Amino acid sequence: MRKHLFKKVAMTYSNEKWKNSIQRKHTLYPRKNDIRSDFFRDYNRILHCTAYRRLKRKTQVFFATSNDHICTRIEHVHHVVSVSRIIANYLGLNSELTDAIAVGHDLGHAPFGHAGESFLKEIARKEIKETFWHEKNSLYFVDNIETLEDPDGFHFNLDLTYAVRDGIICHCGEVDDYNIFPRNDFIELEIINEPNEFKPYTWEGCVVKIADKISYLGRDIEDALTLKLLTIKQIKDLIKILKNFGFSDIRGVNNTLLMHEFIIDLCKNSNPNSGIRISEKYFKLMDIIKKFSNENIYSHQRLTNYKEYAKLVINSLFYTLKEYYSQLDTLTKLKREKNKYPLLISYFIDWIEKYSKNSYRKQKYHNSKIYNLHKKKDYLRAILDFISGMSDNFALKCYYELISF
């Protein structure tokens, strides 16, 4: 194994893509004596935004868990940061860029995990004739929703660099090829309409893409073991599979074991000519582990039951708020009714006032105004955005409010 094989193609100032990669839509407010790089500043901006904080109460696999040892979305994010950084440092890539992409890759993910995403997709298709998928929603959140205060106390959008935004929308962890190469085209990211439509623009984005998959394979199995969802036979079958792939002398399965082996295999097989890649043997193992999890964990009856509950919660919140639309009288109507559902409606009023072009209250918010209440579609989009930003716990609190008397 040779270190730093990718050093010449790393995203640094000598890379021909550098100027494009550090582009921002606007100019960030200046910081005197700032010692951070563009990408590290992006990492910090993501770390301080509210969507990042809510990841600690968002589902990874197991819904609204009260068990402190079960993985939530925020832990998954930091596994991806860790795996990406190890790989980037060994290969000679820019680990500040991988850190920023990885820490932001799931911002705006729906509550209740991928099940919640599928429910919002159904609503979006039916109500506004658009699709919903979390990678594009993550880009939408960092571009239009999340804000930070400047030194004068005014809120502005995050305005992340192109390379970080690109890595976020192109991070889809479903890796269908042995090797991944970055694309050459500098495109408007808003034109991307489906997952995996484009490869990432940078090698660093390619690393995060595969690190996302490496990070969850073993962690989901660990959680299933903790919750006793797997039978003794299923565990023995999995150990047998791993032994057939050269994992000798193992008596159990854990995330660190699998992550280590996949990371070493990737670093051993990757180079600028062959791409970011894992061996054919480990690629096959990755698919086998995923199939095992699909059959024995993700389709488990305990999860299936909760999915139905989560669907009820999301649909109830959406269609309750939908009833309050009244064009420019919408805010007035919401304020008049907020005592009925004080938690849900009060927070939604704040959301509308922050992002609506029709809000006349003097505000500290200088962010993009993305909703026009003249248009019902914009109002329905606002509800979708509001729900997609919720944590599992907050969504449940709002639902309990709807059914309480």
Image (cartoon, helix red, strand yellow):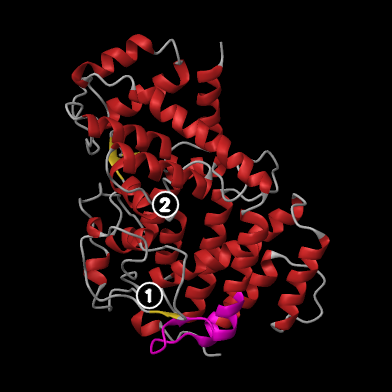
Secondary structure, mark 2, is helix
User: Alpha-carbon distance for marks 2 and 1?
Assistant: 21 Å
Viewer can see residue 400:
yes
Q: Nearer the viewer, residue 399 or 203?
A: 399
356 left or right, relative to 146? left
Residue 203 numbered tag: 1
> What amino acid is at disc 1?
Trp
Is 103 rendered above or below residue 157? below
Is 368 rendered above or below residue 340? below
Between circles 2 and 1, the one closer to the viewer is: 1
In the rendering, at what x and y percent does residue 314 appear? Answer: 47, 34
70 left or right, relative to 85? right
Residue 283 magenta: yes
Q: Residue at x 24, y 55 (%)?
A: 190
Residue 44 numbered tag: 2
Q: Residue at x 77, y 51 (%)?
A: 228
Image quarter (top left, top right, bottom left or bottom right) of the N terminus:
bottom right
Marks 1 and 2: in contact by CB < 8 Å?
A: no
> What amino acid is at disc 2?
Asn
* Residue 110, picture quadrant: top left
Secondary structure, mark 1, is helix
In the rendering, at what x and y percent does residue 383 appear? Answer: 35, 32
Q: How many marks?
A: 2
* Residue 197, picture quadrant: bottom left
Compare marks 2 and 1 and give the one earlier in the sequence.
Answer: 2
Magenta residues (range): 266-285
Q: Nearer the viewer, residue 404 or 273?
A: 404
How crowded is the residue under tag 1: few (<14 C-alpha within 10 Å), some, or many (20+)?
many
Q: Nearer the viewer, residue 3 or 192?
A: 192
Residue 263 magenta: no
How crowded is the residue under tag 2: few (<14 C-alpha within 10 Å), some, or many (20+)?
some
In the rendering, at what x and y percent does residue 311 appear? Answer: 51, 37
